Image: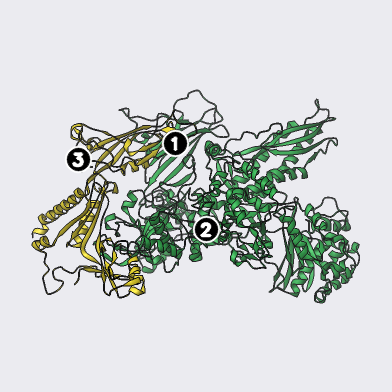
Chain colours: A yellow, B green
Amino acid sequence: MSNIVNIEYNRVTNTTSTDFPGFSKDGDNAWDVQKFRDNFDINISSINERDANFDLVHIYTSLANAFRRIMMSEVPSVAAEYVYFMNNTSVIQDEVLAHRIGLVPLKIDPDMLTWVDKTLSEEEKFTDENTVVLSLNVKCTRNPDAPKDCTDPRILYKNAHVYARDLKFEPQGKQKETFADRPVVPCDPEILLAKLRPGQEISLRVHCILGVGGDHAKFSPVSTASYRLLPQINIIQPITGDSAKRFQSCFPKGVIDINGEGEAVVADARKDTVSREVLRHEEFEGKVQLGRVRDHFIFNVESTGAMTPEEIFFKSVRILKNKAEYLKNCPIGQS
Amino acid sequence: MSQGMVKKRKTASGVEHTHGKDENFDELLKPVFKGKKLTDEINTAEDKWNLLPAFLKVKGLVKQHLDSFNYFVDDDLKKIIQANQLILSDVDPEFYLKYVDIRIGKKSSSSVRDYLTPPHECRLRDMTYSAPIYVDIEYTRGRNIIMHKDVEIGRMPIMLRSNKCILNEADEKTMAKLNECPLDPGGYFIVNGTEKVILVQEQLSKNRIIVEADPKKEIVQASVTSSTHERKSKTYVITKNGKIYLKHNSIAEEIPIVVVLKACGIISELEIMQLVCGNDSSYQDIFAVNLEEASKLNIYTQQQALEYIGAKVKTMRRQKLSTLQEGIEAIATTVVAHLTVEALDFREKALYMAMMTRRVVMAINNPKMVDDRDYVGNKRLELAGQLISLLFEDLFKKFNSDFKASIDKVLKKPNRAMEYDALLSINVHSNNITSGLNRAISTGNWSLKRFKMERAGVTHVLSRLSYISALGMMTRISSQFEKSRKVSGPRALQPSQFGMLCTADTPEGEACGLVKNLALMTHITTDYDEQPIKKLCYIIGVEDISMIDSASLHLNYGIYLNGTLIGITRFANKFVTQFRNLRRSGKVSEFISIHINTHQKAVQIATDGGRICRPLIIVNGGKSRVTAQHLADLMNGELVFDDFLKLGLVEYLDVNEENDSFIALYEKDISPASTHLEIEPFTVLGAVAGLIPYPHHNQSPRNTYQCAMGKQAIGAIAYNQFKRIDTLLYLMIYPQQPMVKTKTIELIDYDKLPAGQNATVAVMSYSGYDIEDALVLNKASIDRGFGRCETRRKTTTILKRYPNHTQDIIGGMRVDENGEPIWQHKSLGPDGLGEVGMKVESGQIYINKSIPLNSTEPFSGDATSQFKETPVVYRAPEASHIDQVMMSVSDNDQALIKVLLRQNRRPELGDKFSSRHGQKGVCGIIVKQEDLPFNDQGISPDIIMNPHGFPSRMTVGKMIELISGKAGVLNGSLEYGTCFGGSKLEDMSKILIDQGFNYSGKDMLYSGITGECLQAYIFFGPIYYQKLKHMVLDKMHARARGPRAVLTRQPTEGRSRDGGLRLGEMERDCVIAYGASQLLLERLMISSDAFEVDVCNSCGLMGYSGWCTTCKSAENVIKMTIPYAAKLLFQELLSMNIAPRLKLDDIFQE
């Protein structure tokens, strides 16, 4: 069976791989490490602080999907969990402000903290090993230097807008040393938390702890982590002349080239968004076959900023490995 | 037309620009609006819709209420005062008191309005938003005549935003200062702190002839409801056995119509024939029999006729009149009472009744000549102003008679020391008017003595569930028809509703079709004086009715002013054209309608109030009068809507005149015969139905469902929502304006106070927890704030003062041995009230109130330990936070405490959501993000909707909304789904293709669970979803043991009383049929109200403690268990002398 998913006009076929043991009588298809090592390939197209784009080639769908799922919901990260209000005279309600603070991604290496034991009482729960304390103390005042005819509240008043950068790190115990070279700051300082007017103030303390995205989306280290399959365009019959031009316009720029003979050729199928626009036109019927390579995953990992995307991916691999090992050591597995 | 007029207006509109309310609309009229510049080519066909915002700028959304109230306080009050201006004394003939003038909220001496307590303060302090009513009076004191100005006779509740309200023409800044929302439409009252709306009442028009036929009973009747300030009565002209009679409530039996006409002074039978039938021989044949009837009764002269009638009159007079006088009285005052008779000249009345008879004859001759009761042109709408006017006049009359009684009482006393000053006793009764008005508005019971009218449910509490629900309430029209009656006529959609009443917005169920809503561009007329119009008619060539001989009456067109014949004309078309020209040039009020009824050979002119009308563009000679230049001037702000009226480009048509016109829907449809052009077709819908995108693609009931649901959507309510302390308020934390808007949404500012969020929807089957319209929600979306809402609940406590100078008090908090407050008092502050921001859990106290044990006897001095704690305890499944605590003083000087509790809620299983297409569903499962399908971009849906929702509902509009929304998201633009317009589907598909998506809006998705591609393409994109107020947290309920009702000892009913779940009759039937007798016993007795009784087997009655009180023995007493309700029944029967005796036997004989 081919490893191409067929993109038809109104359906997708051949979506499932069949290369597992027992599916067909010829070839046992058993998983072989060596074979996997020989075939498996990683191509990195782009990588930076916030996002990464890389290909995993010749890998089982379930594995690729497991990485995606783990990155989203099982790689731990640090986020605000407990917010203690000393004062809040702003219009925004305590619960809403706390929720907003919780969603602010923080630049904390999750390895610096340990897990909080939630069974302990409120007094014993938090230590300098498992909790990062932030505080927010802002008070809005009038700006005496504001021009008379100004209507912009940001100029008219001081601290009219409260941003994530106003969250200040308060090192506890030995955190002064451990966090000395990388103080805790929000990844995106420009996140608007609240708006104030003169006379209003907010004063609160935040306890940030380790968590996983499965518990709450704020603990997810990625904005999203997903993949798509590599598109494939198969021109069965040559398309030439004006028809080729029209054919080209059915795809995003750079997907189809027209060669010297005026014939449409596939330049870069990877750039295709698989809009299936060609399939709408009768003139291309039977001339082109769209598909996607089933074991070629183009991953896109967008980090929230606490960790680099590759670190998140590596962690997902490690977590999957630990899970497999746990399963291997399970009493059930050893029988 | 005159350029000068335009110029003059320019300055006038320049002044208007400083008005606050205009700011909102200014934006719509700014040079650059929604990407359209002034330099853009003006296309009349496209841009004539700009007249709509211009109309709303002048009229506002609830202008009908404001206009009517303004008319009442400015004009109607003065008329009422004039009609009741004199108070005379029965004792002293010299004495008189005369009302000269009346004013509301302003003294004649001062140039500014009185200070009124601002509306928001009234809401918070449970006060009435009212202004003093001042009258100027003139009266005698001894020999002197004294003038007195500005005497307060009571307080009038003020409609918000009316011209007596302090918010009238207030700009946004002033509104903010007064804690008011600038988007609030006003039009309601604040009475004792609650917002009350007087709904628009729909009625059959008064003083008009309605002809009806009952083919089964062979009855044809013409009826007229005469309504004057003093009385209401109904006069009928009906057929009976082929003869025509007059029927009236105060006349014992039907009177032959010829007798009536003779009583009116038309003695000649020829003239009667001429008046009724003209020269039409078929009419004459039908009518001739009536003449015979009169001669059979031997009535030939007026005197005979009057005496005949006088003998049949039901009288309740004290002094007896002769039958002749009774007859004259009846004809002059009771029959067709709205026509006044001067100097016993009955001719006008005779003509009126002859016309009624003629209509009956016409209907007999041709059964199609009957009127339709349900036709909107035969309806009149009664608004707040009219209703309050009726009430006020009643109260004012009562006030005057009380006043007169107290004056008489004083004047009766002989030799008074001082000369009596009537001013002293005027204030005594002033409370009557104030409290009368307050009571009527707050209870909704309108009881008018003079009409013997009792009407309940006139007012309603303004629903503040959402901005839309408040707005929807202001445009609502309630009908007088009984809800329970199963009639289809009044409920059906009338073709004449087009453009006047919303075609979609009506409730489902019993009130369906009876409760209606106004369309977007409507106006309800107020009364207009008919005398000038009458004069005008004579000037432009109408022949006065009193000058015409009866023979030529029906040869020509009759001119009817408010249903009364005032003259005839030979050139009806010419007259109507002339009249219309006068109206278009502004010589006559624009709300006066005129139309020709060719069937009745009549020209009807209407000046009365309560007619619905709407503006239309005038078309002349196949060309729209509104040109591109006019629209350009409108957008420049050089013209306002009123200028269009003055220039004769646009005019108001009521339903009757609309039916006499030929209206083109679009400019392209104009033919040489067209008379008018529609301003904008989407104005057939009202404000609430205007929220729906692409409603013209939906099945019509779906739009109706959405109209009901849009009012339940949680969103932003007003700009002052956090300042309000309402009994219950639902707010959404992050409301969004819809991706697919409509023009109506912008016009009613729904985009500023939205109620919903744009959810990314995948239309697919997922997990099986989405059957029967259930929705699958994305957990991560909820974590990030999707569908979060807040409830705010108020508790009011009043600290009462008692006659013995004791008073309720607020205690402090109790502390334990460590000085910490006890658990119940944790959220209290040192003042005994909950602290703002504290969490209150079920069982905790947030107002620690105590009441004195002794509140009646004189105070003994020992102040301590005489109080009983009556704290306000919080009881709910979830904790709340204290949002606000307000302490104030109410009207009667008692301390008023309001505590507002706030609860933050994230969506949970069972919460109800709905799109804008009447597609509601509950959340069936909440799924983790990684399990949900995702597309190439990694986007996963917020909501998964089951595709089975589409085929049977046929909400194609929802699909187009999704595609337009998706195109808008990709394009960075807001798309329009306006009714009969909006963004075109082809254009939207084009955007999708250009952005690399499929034209159909269907994407290839990957399963989040397996990671493989899904085999079908999934319809995927944003749809605006509303969270509805029905939430699981407010409904969940279970009980094992709990309270029981005192009387029956059965478990209580209802969630609020922690009641049980009833195993009802039908469930019981099932169990009986199944034969599970022990289950029955357990459910119906043991778990309910089992009770052990002692039954005496000898007498069969119940005793107690093993003793039969009837037999005075314990011998045959047997203990048994019966339901307490059964025991109660036996005892109740005993109390009414029925002895139910129990006979006990063993079933299992030994």
Q: Say what secondary structure mark 1 lies in.
A: helix
**Circle 2 is placed at which residue position?**
B689
- Whether residue B1063 sits left or right of residue A50 in the image: it is right
Circle 2/circle 3 CB separation < 8 Å? no
Q: Residue at x 77, y 38 (%)?
A: B100
Subunit of label 3: A
User: Please, what secondary structure does the residue beneath circle 3 have?
Assistant: loop
For disc 1, the chain is A
Q: Secondary structure at mark 2?
A: helix
Tags 1 and 3 touching, CB below 8 Å: no
x, y percent for residue B859: 53, 25
Please tell me which residue lies in front, B993 or B908.
B993
Identify the image quadrant of the C terminus of chain B. Answer: bottom left
- Identify the residue position indicated by label 1 in the image: A153
Dot 1 or dot 3, earlier in sequence: 3
Subunit that carries the residue with mark 2 = B
Q: Residue B1098 falls in which quadrant of the image? A: bottom left
- Residue B810 image point, x, y percent: 45, 31
Q: Nearer the viewer, residue A25 or B1075?
A: A25
Residue flagged by tag 2: what amino acid is it?
Ala
Left or right of residue B329: residue B936: left
Picture disc at residue A113: 3
Q: Amino acid at mark 1?
A: Pro
Q: Identity of the amino acid at label 3?
A: Leu
Q: Which quadrant holds residue B761?
A: bottom left
